[in-house]
Amino acid sequence: MQAVAARQRSKAEAFAKKHGIPEVKDTYEELLADPNIDCILIALPNSLHYEWAARAIRAGKHVLVEKPSTSNSHEAEMLFSMPELSQPNGPILLEAFHNRFFPSWALFNSLFEDEEVEHVSSASMVPWWGTSDTDINFNYNLSGGSIMAMGTYNMSALRLAFGAEPIECVSCETEHFTEGVQKDCDWNFKAVFRFPGDKIGEATTTLKGPTWWTPSTVAVTTRERVMVNSKVHPSQEETRSRKIVLHGLVHGVFWHRIDVTDVYVTRNKKTGAVIAKHEEKKSHKAYTFKEAGGQFANLPGDTHWMSYRYQLEEFVNKIRGRKTQHWVTAEDSVAQMKMIDMAYEKSGLGLRPTSKVVI
C-alpha cells in the first residue's frame, strides 16, 4: 500500500504508522490525483461507496469497493454501468466479497450441483460486545443495518448455492431502532426467499448476538437422486440426499470445516416401501487450493493466506489481463443489491438512502 487518507489526518497517520504505509494524504481527492497510485480501496461507510468508487473510476483508478458495493440497487446499476468500465484497458471494479475467493468456498461448491439443491440456509453473528449503538452500522444516513453489515454475506451464499436469483422475499422479520440517527436500522433479521422451482432460502444475522462468537455458516440440502451404479437388487432402488455445511463462511482462515452428511435410502421399486436407510458423514478442510483439489489443485496459495490475500491476487490478475479462478461480475453485484432491496422492502424499513451526489 502506497498511501492512505481519512477525514481526520491523525487517524490516517496512526493507521499508516501501524501498517508501514509510506504516505498520508490530506484528502481523498489527493489520493485520486496521485499518478503513482493505480488502485483504490473504498473502505468508507456504505453510504459513501457509490460516490467515491465512481470518483476513483473517473480518475482512471482500479477500484476494490467494500461490500455491500452501494446503498441500494439503483446506485449499483449506476456504478457498474459507468462507461469507463467498458473501455479498452479501462478501470477494473470489484466488489470485495473476499470470502468467495477462499479455497474452502471452491471446495464447498464442488460438493453439489445447483440443480440438485432444494434448500439453503445461512447465518452469521457478531457478539453484543462487538458493536455499540453509535457504530456506523446503526446509522441510517450511512446506510447501516445488519442486512448491510453481515447479511449481505448470507444472501450472497443463497444466490450462489442455488445458482439463481430470488423471485421474491417471502418474509423479513427484524429487530430495529425506532428513533434518532439509528431509526430503521436493524440489528437482527431473518429473511425467507423463494427461488425458481419454489425452492426456499433462509438468511439470518444478528449484530447483538450471544457473548460467545460462533462461526458463520451456510447449509445446502439436496434432493434425493437415484444412484445409478448402486449394488442393490434389481427390484430395489437406492437414492442419496446430501447436506453440506460450511462452517466459517466469512472468515474461513480462522476456523472452518465442511461437514457432509449423505443419507442413503433403499426402496422397493414397485411399492416404494423403505427397505434400508443409513448415513455416511465426512468432514473436509481447505486452506489452500491444493487441499480443495480437483480443478483448483494447481492454483497458488499458502495455509497462512487470508481470504483477503486470495482476493487481492485475483484482483491483480484481472488488472494484468490474466485468468481468474473466481470473479464477482457487475451483474452479480447489481443482483446482490436487488436482493438486499427485496429484504428491506419486505421488512417495512425501506431501502437505504440513495446518494444525492451526481458523478
Image: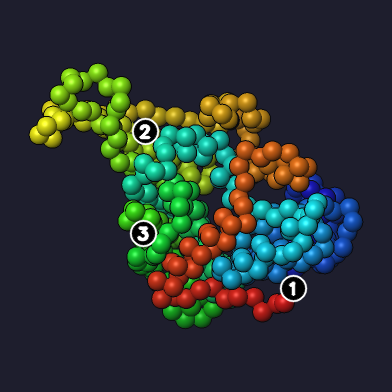
Viewer-nearest of labels 2 and 1?
A: 1
Q: Give x and y (percent) for residue 239.
A: 25, 31
Q: Earlier in the sequence, mark 2 or mark 3?
A: 3
The residue under label 2 is 260
The residue under label 1 is 359
Q: Earlier in the sequence, mark 2 or mark 1?
A: 2
Where 29 sits versus 284, above or below? below
Q: Residue at x 20, y 28 (%)?
A: 237
Check contact, mark 2 vs mark 3: CB within 8 A. no
Q: Earlier in the sequence, mark 3 or mark 1?
A: 3
Q: Nearer the viewer, residue 180 or 63?
A: 63
Q: Residue at x 39, y 43 (%)?
A: 115
The secondary element bearing badge 3 is classed as strand
Q: Residues within 10 Å of mark 2 (few under 14, many from 20)?
A: many
Cα separation between marks 2 and 3: 24 Å
Q: Residues within 10 Å of mark 1 (few under 14, many from 20)?
A: few
Q: Give x and y (percent) for residue 85.
A: 74, 58
Residue 194 shows which numbered tag?
A: 3
Q: Give x and y (percent) for residue 38.
A: 82, 52
